[in-house]
Image: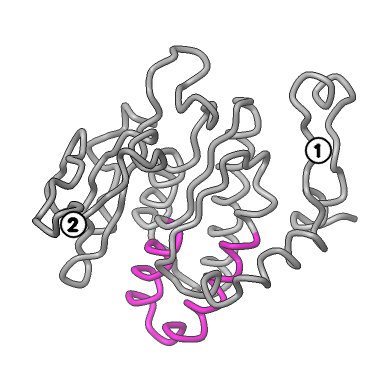
Amino acid sequence: MVNEKNRNTIKQVKSKQRVADHGEVFTNEREVNAMLDLMKQETERIDSRFLEPACGNGNFLAEVLRRKLNVVDQRYGKSQVEWERYAVIAVSSIYGVDILEDNAQECRARLLRIFTDWYTKQFKTTKSECIRSVRFLLHRNILHGNALDFTKPDTKKPIVFSEWSSVNGSKIKRRDYVFRFLVEKTHQFALFNDEGDAAAIDEPVKDYPLIDFLKLGEDDNNEL
């Protein structure tokens, strides 16, 4: 019997047609770990943000999540409230884009399954609100899109990512930014211009009020 971790890493090709059409070949577990080990310190920092622009069904992001949850266990495993808060922060730092919608869907489901399995093994009693928050984060962070032209393939609208920041303990701040602005050199965040004067920072397309981490998605079910 193949467990969840191995099932998704053994099969590197879904079909020859997908390889021909999209060059889709999933990275195997050994290569994933070797590459992540090159930045091991960052993979083990709970709030370090990772973006996989061709995430497939999540081989890289799944391993990043596992590494982050291991750190959460080590530091906060004795307190369920603290574990939940930092585990949510860990999930909020993981981003992915894939041009194939089924891959994005599989990636979300896979990461949610990893989190849920981890959570239920760590604590006898779990909170549905915590799982709902994680589900919401994954729907906001793992997107069906084209990372080359920064648009959604079906609508050609720009990809918009949410930035999540922990504030005042249990509160989360959300700001939405257009993906193109986050990666193109002409729109990089800068505090100072060439003359050394204060420069404008790109404004988010939407700014949200602070919210408790267990209430994420509570009023945004339409976004799911």
For label 1, count other residues whose C-alpha is less than 10 Å away and answer few (under 14), some (14-19) or many (20+): some
Q: Position of residue 96 (x, y in %)?
A: 53, 43
| Image: magenta residue range | 63-91
Question: Which residue corresponds to the image point at 60% horizontal and 75% vertical from the top-left?
Answer: 40
Q: Position of residue 122 (x, y in %)?
A: 53, 75
Question: Which residue corresponds to the image point at 82% horizontal and 63% vertical from the top-left?
Answer: 30
Question: Which residue corresponds to the image point at 39% horizontal and 31% vertical from the top-left?
Answer: 224
Q: Is residue 14 magenta?
A: no
- Which residue is tagged 1? 25
Residue type at numbered disc 2 = Leu
Q: Quadrant of residue 6?
A: bottom right
Distance between the alpha carbons at the discs numbered 1 and 2: 40 Å
Task: Tell me which numbered mark, 1 or 2, is placed earlier along the sequence.
Answer: 1
Question: Which residue corresponds to the image point at 27% horizontal and 39% vertical from the top-left?
Answer: 176
Callout 1 secondary element? loop
Q: Nearer the viewer, mark 1 or mark 2?
A: 2
Vertically, is 3 above or below 180?
below
The residue lying furthest to the left in this view is 197
Q: Position of residue 88 (x, y in %)?
A: 39, 61
Query: In terms of secondary structure, what is the magenta stretch mainly?
Result: helix
Callout 2 secondary element? loop
- Which residue is tagged 2? 191
